[in-house]
Amino acid sequence: MSTVIEESGARGEEGRVPDDLLALADRVAGWARSGEEVEVYVARGHETEVRAYDGEVESLTSASSAGIGIRVVADHRLGFAWAGSLDESVLGEALDEARDNASFATPDEHVRLAVPDGVAAVPVDLWDERLAEVPTTEKVALALALEAQARGADPRIRQVNAADYGDASVEVALVSTTGIRASSRRTSGYLSVGVIAGDGEASQTGGGFSVGRGFDGLDPDRATEDAVTRAVRLLGATKGPSGRSTVVFDRRVASTLLSVVSSALSGEAVAKGRSFFAGRLGEQVGDPVLTLVDDPTDPRAYGAAAFDAEGLACRRNVLVDAGVLRGFLYDTVSGSRAGTASTGSAVRGGFAGTPGPGCRALTLAPGREGHDEAGVLAAVGEGLFVQSVTGVHSGVNPISGDFSVGAEGLMIRDGRLAEPVREITVASTLQRILQSLVAVGADLEWLPGIAAGQTLAVGDMQVSGV
């Protein structure tokens, strides 16, 4: 067993609203000089990760972190600096460094900090008080139990690659001299397991997981069943047939597809000509069944939040309505470039990053029929069910819309899953996919990442196999 323990920065009192972080951010923002705008972002968090393998703990990591990110705007120049500590000695240094960086920046009339826009924040409870009370021994025991459960779940399971437990708690405060003052906190947890199933010389892999706000919401049975089912049902897979076909994407793959589409809905990407939606506002870009919404105020979403990364209230943004492109996502700067306001959609990767526009909780409105996966399969009748894809980063282009990925799954016959297939390629364009939706499932599943998962059927796609 290898164990890594990292401690840097102080962990907050259990369940405490980060008032002390707000006070610290207030104090640093108060050091602003005449003629400059200052934004102070402070955060602290704690993470635990456990990996079980072959009945033992392979690794255990428990790490706390804290830091500050400061943006300074002076004479339309933006400077940024950060420090991985909240020690008094580094606060002033980080501010001075941000000022210095601003002095070397190129002036830009659109560079500015967010100002309050009058939109009230929707309260969302994203904090599990009990997470901090669960001893590490229980987290280790859960990972070990998950690994043992997966190993014994089916006689065809030959190996468990790994069983992982993870959790995180994060507290954030943001204060600016332009009137922004916001704070938030959230917890999250996950279980994941990967298995290898075998039958004779054939073998297949499968992965499953469970996510929640804390320890008690995690379901090892769900993670195990998901992994085992995905591996076992592909045993004996052969190359699938070639031709044009209706393709049903399972919820995970649909989430990946929506994540790619989300990048094309960024106002910054549109302004830079890096979106296949550029110049199409108000046009019919999809089938009338397509309604695409980013709603971080839904507490079920993995990326839910009351405030965005600039301290503005998050809000529900309808991006595509009945197939018509209605809008893009903006932070303050990209909104200024487009001649519009922020949509409360700034995101950032923590205190070491700067904000930019992006999705947090993208979903498709369910189709009229309200089908789950089985209902979508029955409605389709004949086609291909895709349960995993490869080559997304190289084969999908959100600028041109080109779409070509490797896939594996099962054929659909008489509205049910039939023989497994592998080594196939599914191709089209994102534009054509959105125009060719056959069904949107009502089986919404909140997954880690920026987009929910729903069973999605797309007509007339090119499938290349044998």
Image (cartoon, rainbow, N blue to C red):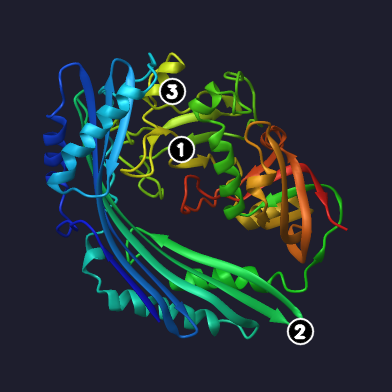
- The image quadrant that residue 277 belongs to is top right
**Rendered view: 305 above or below 213:** above
Side of 351 where 33 appears, left or right:
left
Quadrant including the N terminus: bottom left
Badge 2 crowding class, 10 Å Cα cut-off, few under 14, some 14 to 19, many 20 or more, is few
Quadrant location, the C terminus: bottom right
What is the spatial separation of the Cα atoms under label 2 and label 1, in whole angstroms?
45 Å
Q: Residue at x 52, y 79 (%)?
A: 150
Residue shown at 30% from the left, 22% from the top: 103
Report the residue marked by disc 3: 334
Q: Amino acid at mark 3?
A: Ser
Residue under numbered circle 2: 200
Answer left or right for 394 relative to 133.
right
Residue 362 placed where, x, y %? 49, 40
Judge whether residue 28 can be spotted in this image. Answer: yes
Residue bearing the label numbered 1: 359
Instruction: Tell me the residue at 67%/74% (across/down).
Output: 232
Closer to the chain start, of discs 3 and 1, is 3
Relative to residue 114, is residue 400 drawn left or right?
A: right
Image quadrant of residue 315? top left
